[in-house]
Image (spheres, rainbow, N blue to C red):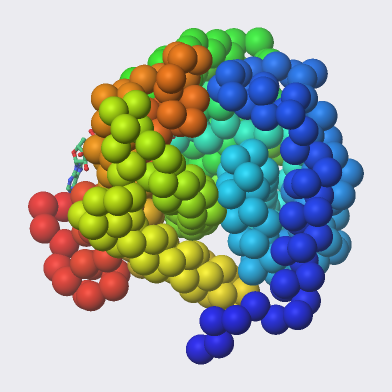
């Protein structure tokens, strides 16, 4: 295996860095520092438009679907750089919803949904979890009933989703619904694209410990054209599990971890308020060295997943391993940071004397999210045991 990037990939990374140097302005940084991603016409919205103009939302899609035809490694490099710079890039709509539409969607789905996704104009919230269906997602009860025919009828949707992240700034729901209540529970599930501004859709905020906003979403007699069904009716489980594997891969890029450790190493060299320089302590240096080595491992895992995608395989066991490793590593980085920074490490954003404006205090609160987001680590350990090591499944 060759771990080096080739000349073309190195040139691509330079192009991405040049774009970021030009467009990550102090004004954009200031808006991001407020963690206010809600503004529809702010700096972030302008930054997204620039990404769309470059065609980078669909950079690894085939040209016939409006993409640039570059590979998953190019996309991985771009996402790593964006994460390193701390700015949002292609989101789950691009990295997990669109590939499923390409693989399984009808010709009409592709013509209708892919071009606006590539331009950054269509953004989906991912509507899987329900109050009674988390890990056991196949127990979902949101119901869609077809009135009329598949050509010119309508789906009538009723139900509720929870933890519906990003719905407040999305245009559509990638909504997982039950279309055949009499079928075994993994069958009889479909995916329907629902415009969020449709009558009958209600979005209510839910705020996590970190201040991260997610939502509850309610669907009361929501009507959408029958053609908004993705692919085939009752085949949704396959699309959802494929999208979830892609989501795990996309969520586990190590760019932000590299940045956190680089910043932590720099902070460790500065005297704290009590006069101590953390990096002078050999125990601190050992912990930082361990984190550095672990980030390197996480980076290689990311390249492994991107290479599998480049070979046409959706990695499953590999991204489960990567997701567990990176989410637990993120938490360890935050824990080392708080130990190393002493009492000031507990000071939050906008507090005078907060090291790095409280970013490690925030990381400490936000890090647990990815231990259960996109499937809990406990369950992914089962996935690795069963799919990776052919071990038996208990209790199902
Ligand atoms: C901030 C936040 C954002 C989220 N965003 C989204 C989103 O945008 N879209 C979306 O659809 N969902 C989203 N989720 C939901 C997330 O994917 C679920 O929380 C997760 O899948 C777990 O489901 P649950 O919370 O119902 O926990 P449960 O499924 O009730 O699990 C509770 C505990 O039991 C363990 N457990 C359950 N079953 C097993 C088993 N078979 N074997 C071993 N252990 C088991 C779990 O590991 C966990 O520790 C989000 C969640 C949060 C908190």
**What residue lies at 11% left-to-right and 52% top-to-bottom?**
395
**What residue lies at 77% left-to-right and 20% top-to-bottom?**
42
Q: Looking at the picture, does residue 200 appear above or below residue 37?
A: above
**What residue lies at 64% left-to-right and 54% top-to-bottom?**
81
- Closer to the camera, 117 or 299? 299
Residue 121 spot, x, y in % from top left: 79, 33
Residue 101 spot, x, y in % from top left: 66, 51
Task: State left or right for residue 377 relative to residue 162.
Answer: left
Q: Which residue is outermost to the bottom? A: 1
Residue 49 quadrant: top right
Q: Looking at the picture, does residue 168 appear above or below residue 9?
A: above
Residue 57 spot, x, y in % from top left: 75, 48
Task: State left or right for residue 160 relative to residue 114.
Answer: left
Q: How many marks?
A: 0
Q: Looking at the picture, does residue 268 appear above or below residue 215?
A: below
Does any portion of residue 143 appear in the rendered image? no
Q: Which residue is outermost to the left? A: 395
Residue 326 spot, x, y in % from top left: 37, 54
- Closer to the camera, 330 or 139? 330
């Amino acid at each position: 295996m060759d771990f080096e990037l080739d000349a073309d990939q190195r040139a691509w990374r330079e192009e991405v860095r040049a774009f970021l140097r030009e467009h990550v302005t102090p004004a954009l940084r200031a808006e991001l520092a407020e963690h206010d991603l809600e503004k529809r016409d702010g700096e972030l919205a302008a930054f997204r438009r620039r990404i769309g103009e470059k065609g980078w939302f669909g950079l690894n899609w085939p040209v016939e679907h409006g993409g640039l035809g570059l590979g998953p490694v190019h996309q991985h490099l771009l996402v790593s750089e964006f994460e390193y710079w701390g700015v949002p890039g292609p989101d789950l709509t691009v990295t997990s919803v669109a590939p499923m539409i390409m693989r399984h969607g009808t010709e009409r789905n592709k013509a209708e949904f892919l071009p606006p996704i590539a331009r950054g104009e269509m953004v989906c919230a991912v509507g899987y979890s329900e109050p009674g269906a988390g890990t056991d997602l196949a127990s979902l009860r949101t119901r869609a009933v077809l009135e009329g025919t598949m050509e010119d009828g309508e789906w009538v949707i009723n139900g509720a989703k929870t933890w519906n992240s990003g719905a407040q700034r999305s245009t559509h729901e990638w909504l997982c619904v039950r279309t055949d209540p009499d079928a075994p529970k993994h069958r009889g599930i479909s995916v329907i694209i629902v415009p969020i501004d449709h009558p009958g859709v209600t979005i209510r905020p839910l705020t996590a410990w970190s201040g991260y906003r997610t939502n509850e979403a309610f669907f009361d007699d929501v009507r959408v054209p029958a053609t908004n069904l993705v692919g085939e009716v009752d085949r949704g489980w396959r699309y959802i599990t494929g999208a979830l594997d892609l989501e795990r891969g996309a969520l586990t890029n190590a760019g932000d971890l590299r940045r956190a450790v680089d910043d932590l190493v720099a902070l460790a060299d500065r005297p704290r308020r009590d006069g101590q320089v953390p990096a002078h302590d050999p125990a601190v240096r050992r912990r930082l060295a361990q984190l550095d080595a672990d980030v390197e491992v996480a980076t290689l895992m990311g390249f492994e997943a991107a290479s599998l995608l480049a070979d046409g395989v959706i990695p499953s066991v590999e991204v489960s391993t990567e997701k567990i490793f990176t989410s637990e590593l993120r938490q360890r980085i935050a824990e080392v940071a708080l130990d190393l920074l002493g009492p000031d490490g507990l000071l939050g954003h906008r507090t005078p004397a907060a090291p790095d404006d409280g970013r490690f205090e925030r990381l400490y609160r936000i890090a647990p999210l990815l231990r259960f987001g996109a499937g809990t680590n406990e369950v992914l350990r089962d996935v690795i045991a069963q799919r990776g090591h052919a071990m038996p499944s208990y209790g199902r």
